[in-house]
Amino acid sequence: KTTTTPSSHISPSNIMKEKKIVFIHLDLGIGGAENLIINLALASLPPPQDDNIQSSTKNEELESLNAKVLIYTTHCSQTHCFSEVKIPTGILSSSVAIVGSFLPSTICGGGHALCSSLRILYASYKAYQDHPDADLFVLDVLPTSIPLLTTWLKCTGSVLFYCHFPDKLLTRDTVNGVPVENGNQGVLSSVKRYYRGILDFIEESTMRYADLILVNSNFTRQEVQRVFPSLEEELEEENLKILYPPIDLTKFVVPNFDEKMLQKQNPIVSLNRFERKKNVGILLHAYALLRSNLRSEKPEVHIPPLIIAGGYDPRNIENVQHLSELKALASKLQIMDKVQFQPNVADTQRSYLLKNALCVVYTPNREHFGIVPIESMYAGSPVIAVNSGGPKETILDGKTGFLVENDDVAFMEAMKKIVCNVSLAVDMGKNGHEYVREKFGMEKFRLSWCKMVMEALKRGEVRKRRERESGGGYDVGVRFVGYMMEATIALIVAWVITVVLRLFGVVGDESSVVGEVRAFFSKEKVADEL
């Protein structure tokens, strides 16, 4: 149970009647999506009484949702989660409910998206079963279960969906929406495309059932509009709004720029999850070029070490594989002695790295938003990032960092400017710190989130009134679409079970689950006739 005692600096007139907000998230680990869910939950509570954060809204009377917060998830490892949900000290630890942990995340190493859909459906059902009186259900990552809440279960509350990025653009065949060659050809590739096409259709169809859709950047909004053209009506009705993720400024020590100017061993830092789409390999190539270039042109310049840190889950095969790949690449480039790998860093170590970095290099291409550049700038470190996606909306090129092309030479040139001019790094760090403090702090985020919740509640009332006034016509229409999606999911499940049974030799290569069931009942019918 979460404490929701209002803080002393909030006017009673600004405190709304207590709401119950239920968040539903697949895996409450360490990442940008998880950080956002935690910040949404914290923003739903009254601001803490000892809030010493300086912001442009500090002297204003703040609205508060005064909500009771609950978070439903299918997995939350105490060794791989944010401090807010760690037992027993986390402020949200008692609000977390783990359900459906018995459900598989993959089937024989595949079917991840299908399993995720089934898990989010189960988590949503349990959340509604436990809290049918919730005022608002907040989902992210996958919208699959939204019709379950709004149409089948007829929840009395509203439903809000936060889209970090279309799942359609996060497949193994793409990197943030850019197709890549994976070598898969033939029948299996065609089957996968058909399977993925069905899931993409479900994603687009179910997202429209939300009372309000939020995205993390204008870039993501444009991508949603591009790949989900049927949502154009929702966009025209302003049903899709931007809510930039914030950072909790209290987690960071205010940078000491005088001290930073005097230090000679400040490292170049990369902070990402160990995933191939994070494009960290390009930094290793750029760093090797930097060392070679400075040794020949400016041998007197000290070359800082490189630290590659980030989220690492030993359960995640890609995390394990990619860390090994990066280490192998560093050895091949003969820079292993200058590179430190720090997987799964704690919050305190994360803050220390960002504060003491000479610069932070953020390598993902077409990143949806990117919370690391925001954290880095507030910590007083300039950021070098690819000139695409969310960073274009958060980094001021030439003032708080550099936006460069997605190649190793461009990264090398930007790093060289900073390595050869520490005062430039300090000036950019000061600019970034002030910029983030004013634009991305929790106070401003709390105000924006409060307005979004009120908007979602209002839209939910409009939806329910429309359903009542339609006399069932609207309900029949949405149920028909829902039944079609149910049938589609059933076909996918039957196909997956067929593949698994064939692998284990339970059924023949020419057999299928549907065929075996049909044959079984045919035999029963013949037996009855005899």
Image (cartoon, grey):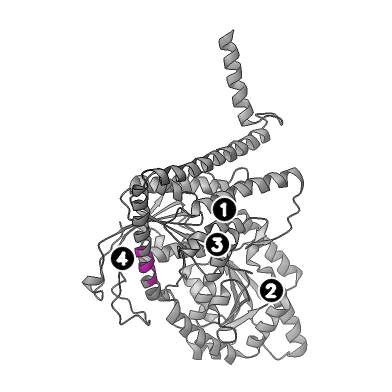
Instruction: From the image, tell me which residue sits under label 4.
Output: 65
Marks 3 and 4, the one that precedes in the sequence: 4
Marks 1 and 2, the one that precedes in the sequence: 1
Please say whether residue 23 is visible from this viewpoint: yes
Q: Tell me which corner region of the image, top left, top right, bottom left or bottom right, holds residue 490.
A: top right
Instruction: From the image, tell me which residue sits under label 3.
Output: 165
Label 2 residue SS: loop
For marks 1 and 2, give the one nearer the viewer. 2
Contact (Cβ within 8 Å) of mark 2 with mark 3? no
Q: Nearer the viewer, residue 444 or 412?
A: 444
For marks 2 and 3, give the one nearer the viewer. 3
Which residue lies at the image location 73% right of the left edge and 68% below the top edge?
Answer: 331
Circle 1 Cα neighbour tier, 10 Å, few/some/many (<14 / 14–19 / ≥20): few
Task: Tell me which amino acid carries mark 4.
Answer: Leu
Instruction: From the image, tell me which residue sits under label 1.
Output: 315
For marks 1 and 3, give the one nearer the viewer. 3
Residue 133 in percent (x, y) is at: 30, 50
Marks 2 and 3, the one that precedes in the sequence: 3
Residue 21 in percent (x, y) is at: 35, 57
**What is the C-alpha distance between the residues marked 3 and 4?**
27 Å
Disc number placed over residue 338 in the picture, else none:
none
Task: Tell me which amino acid carries mark 2.
Answer: Asn
Image height of 338 relative to 416, above or below: above
Locate the C terminus and report the quarter of the image it occupies.
Answer: top right
Which residue lies at the image location 57% right of the left edge and 46% below the top edge?
Answer: 114
Give the magenta range: 448-454
